[in-house]
Amino acid sequence: MRQPEDRLVIDSQQHEDRLFPPPPEFANRARIRSMDEYRALYRQSVEKPEEFWAERARELVWTKPFDRVLEWQSPHAQWFVGGQLNASFNCLDRHVQQGRGSKPAIVWEGERGEERILTYEELLAEVSRLANALRAMKVRTGDRVGIYLPLVPEAVVAMLACARLGATHSVVFGGFSAEALRDRMEDAGAKLLITADGGFRKGQVVPLKANADEALQKLPGVERVVVVRRTGEKVPMKPGRDIYWDEAVRGQPATCESVALDAEHALFILYTSGTTGRPKGVVHATGGYLLQTALTTRWVFDLREDDVYWCTADVGWITGHSYVVYGPLAEGATVVLYEGALNHPEPNRIWDIVERRRVSILYTAPTAIRGFIKAGDDWVKQHDLSSLRLLGTVGEPINPEAWMWYRRVVGGERCPIVDTWWQTETGAIAVAPLPGATPTKPGSATLPLPGIEIEIVDSAGRPVPPGEGGTLVLSRPWPSMLRTVHNDPKRYMQQYWSQVPGRYFTGDGARIDADGYLWLMGRIDDVINVAGHRLGTAEIESALARHPVVAEAAVVGRPDELKGTGICAFVTLKEGKVASTELAAELRSHVAKEIGAIARPDDIRFADALPKTRSGKIVRRLLRDLAAGRESQGDVSTLEDLSVIAALRDSEE
Ligand code: 7RM
């Protein structure tokens, strides 16, 4: 196991001693108001975990109460065994029945400025209509449904309609390619796909339907395709397979009884990159996931009835699942949904939305924050941001400079910042400050939330002393943990529970300081975090290797001012193929086409050979050093003579 010492560590994290206690005005009104309260809650959660979770789980609406809280046969957990509930009911009907029907659930804004507001009552009606339509198309409890949509209200409606029927949804981010979509739909065994004629992104049309058609060419298992009209462009519709959303729901009743599902029923599968070329289908279970996303939304965002809450993530990522859809809707929040790029048409689009919608809670990514810093403070200062009361970040470590800027320029030194650490696999936020209780340190995700136990271990799995770096592991099961890897239970075991036996392996390097605060230091596996999104280097390598001129490729991350990590690909060409700037450009587009634009390499560096160990493993550490050392791409048409390094390495071993 590689240790974090050979990873980039933001130096200033090491010496950060600024401490920001919660502002008293905030703490006085907060849901959790003091460290004493946090500690008491935490203690209860680890000393009597079953009581702790059971008490809170009873706040959800169960059609059948659970018999047992937890069945733990490491590494397999079952939560709320015997209980039945429905996530869509808990996110919608419950609030309508409690008299919040006319409260806005979704405040949507299109990139071109269009607006749609759906109250809880209206959202419930839309979800019910689609659920009825899906049922009419033979979608049954347990079937898988693919969702490949732009960030329009229909994306949320589609997820909740699936949840209503107990069809397991698998959302694929609209920025992914046809190939990526096909792989995921195939692995998930999807029966139906919900997509759109297109989407808008930075003024351009994203051809979602064309991608879907390409993906489905060799996927007869996907029997039906529902198409949202978004761009209004004419797209080919395959008779018998394709139907427009509006036609599918026409005449369908606006009520649809929700299906009572076992707590362990698979709510969704979400694919995430791992250390191999094949993404993993992370499976989440209904009861535990819903409970923990709801509770963490309440605790970490201190959510109140009158908040206007905006998490800028796309529903194609786990952050969108947990903190755009399930967590906030289970809590009855008003959620802002924005279709486009945060800096389109100008760098102030995000601040314009905050001002006009009176956003009170803003949750975004460090990469976005660094982009705003680069655009300049003036874009922010044009706007009245006094509605904001809380700021959050997620996706990657935030450098203290960016944290301080976020606090000062966006938060007016008035808003607490919650730096939230979690993963697709954890389902919900695991480590974060409680804004009314926890004093924050810029760059630290601070302390574990109730129910989460963290440890830092060395390569032998032994706990390290405070302050020392190691691997972050979670030491007990939690309700929203992943249940398995779809179609690959072995991988679930190997990837998460074998590296440190009995502990959940996060893949992150970290240290815990003398105050117990957690400092993340980046991935220690071959996963890179580009602009807050996880990419497997192996995935990019296989994409490159599929290009006819490529003999071999090795992909590493290197520091990038905006994206946190940039992608650098070392490529050796087949005999007789000649490196050139044009070829580099072609390879970059090739990867974007194979995976999606987020995976497009920043640098292509042609090499005559790749440095390898005797056993044939590419020495990535060397390549990382090389990639970090020379920032400029320079003339990519020349071959780098890496055979020397390769030879050097060989003689060392
Ligand atoms: C929510 C999400 C997970 C990986 C994780 C980390 C990194 C996420 C933080 C962070 C430092 C944070 N899910 N990460 N949040 N690193 N501080 N607050 O991003 O599955 O896509 O990625 O992201 O490396 O393992 S994810």
Image (tube, rainbow, N blue to C red):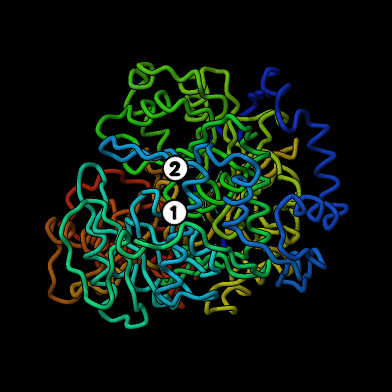
Query: Does 578 sit left or right of 166 as displayed?
Result: left
- Ligand 1 closer than 8 Å to the CB at disc 1? no
Q: Amino acid at mark 1?
A: Glu
Q: What residue do we see at 31% from left, 40% from top?
A: 110
Q: Residue at x 47, y 63 (%)?
A: 272
Measuring 48% from the left and 37% from the top, which residue is drawn there? 310
Q: Residues within 10 Å of mark 1 (few under 14, many from 20)?
A: many
Q: How many marks?
A: 2
Labels 2 and 1 touching (C-beta < 8 A): yes
| SS at circle 2 | strand
Percent x, y for residue 558? 39, 49
Residues 329 and 135: in front is 135
Q: Earlier in the sequence, mark 2 or mark 1?
A: 2
Near mark 2 (Cα within 10 A), the count class, few <14, some 14-19 or many ≥20, is many
Q: Position of residue 456 (x, y in %)?
A: 70, 53
Q: CA distance from mark 2 to mark 1?
A: 9 Å
In the rendered structure, the answer to whether residue 114 lies left or right of residue 530 reads left
Which residue position is annotated with label 1? 126
Q: What residue is disc 2 on?
A: 118
Q: Amino acid at mark 2?
A: Leu
Q: Is residue 555 visible?
A: yes
> The residue tagged with tag 1: helix, strand or loop?
helix
Q: Quadrant of residue 457?
A: bottom right
Rendered position, 149 above or below 442: below
What residue sits 39% from the left and 26% below the top?
Answer: 351
**Can residue 363 be seen here?**
no
- Place of residue 613 in the rendered image (x, y in percent of width and height, measured from the top left): 44, 72
Residue 204: x percent and y percent?
A: 20, 47
Camera-side residue: 509 or 282? 282
